[in-house]
Amino acid sequence: MSDSVIVIGCHIINNHANFLLSKLIDKIIDNNIDFGIVSNSKISEIHYDKSKFFLFDSENDKFEETKSSKFWFENEEFKIESPFLFYGSVQNYSFGASSLFIDSVVLAKKYGYKYLHWIEYDYELNIYEILDNVGILKGDEYSVIVYETESEGHPISGSFISVDIDKINLSKFYTNKEDRKRILNEYDNSSEKFIKKYLLNLENVYYKNVNKISTINGFSQVSQVNMELVILEENGEIKLFLKNNTKENVEYLISTNIGKFKNILKPLHWKLDTIGPISEIGHFYFKSEKRNLYINLNDDDDVKKYIKRNVIYRK
């Protein structure tokens, strides 16, 4: 596969992430495939010494803390915005990730490769899919292969993309930084939307079902936050949004002045419950092994801090 290169996108924040990168590189070398690395974090010299090329891109706005920070959970029925959620962004949150994909394509072209296989550092190497994608791209019709999801916010997998460098139109890959930021935010700060709808919108794209590949990344920053808990008001009622980011059942107790109940949230599941009318609830208490929270609804500071900052939008 001398005409193919795997380009690994990296953001390494701890030893576990570094271990996953090492594991991926070892598998690539064992399969005798060239690889390059693009990263917006520092990586070990032992990794980039083995690569065909390496680029460090310091332009990553993901961790810039500003008052414009927005964090959300979204599905087909509603969107919740809250500072108590993990997933979200400062403005241009996904700029770093989308830039690395652009870097990978430009560098693969520069170094004379025909086929690029973009893989994130914590993703499982799938040799069968790489070989199958090369076979598809060798035909005359398609220039790109992506894995389509059912998510509106993330319509394709950002972890694995195959590209025929000779066929793809690179003009949009040279869009200047400020224009890319503007367009990215028009696509809800989703790098997957940006890649599909902007970078690749003129391409003949071959869509595969995302179930053909693993949908689980080896490292998830969200898994560092065991339980996401949001209390909000909707139509005069107090609602509770819970998201279990662990692989274990979470037992929890909810207690208010009008009642109490116990429940279990399954691993990697979420739920939205109605607690009761805000006019009747004087206090709210949540207790589990993962999180404890008490809110006095008669205290304006508590309401302002824990409830008023959270908003739900129905679709």
Image (cartoon, rainbow, N blue to C red):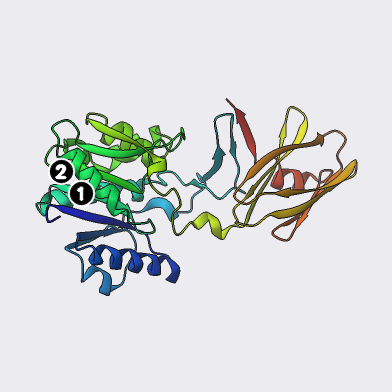
Residue 174 seen in this snapshot? no
Residue position for label 1? 116
Within 10 Å of disc 2 (Cα), the crowding (few <14, some 14-19, many 20+) is: many
Q: Position of residue 27 (x, y in %)?
A: 29, 64
> Which residue is rendered at x = 82% and y = 35% of the image?
276
Q: In the figure, is residue 56 to the left or right of 270? A: left
Q: Residue at x 40, y 41 (%)?
A: 210
What crowding class fits label 1: few (fewer than 14 Cα within 10 Å), some (14-19), or many (20 or more)? many
| Left or right placement of residue 87 versus residue 198 in this view | right
Q: Which residue corresponds to mark 2?
A: 165
Q: What element does badge 2 sit on?
A: loop
| Looking at the image, residue 232 lies above or below residue 76 | below
284, 3: nearer the viewer: 3
Q: Residue furthest bottom?
A: 46
In percent of width and height, residue 10 lies at 34, 59
The residue type indicated by label 1 comes to Leu
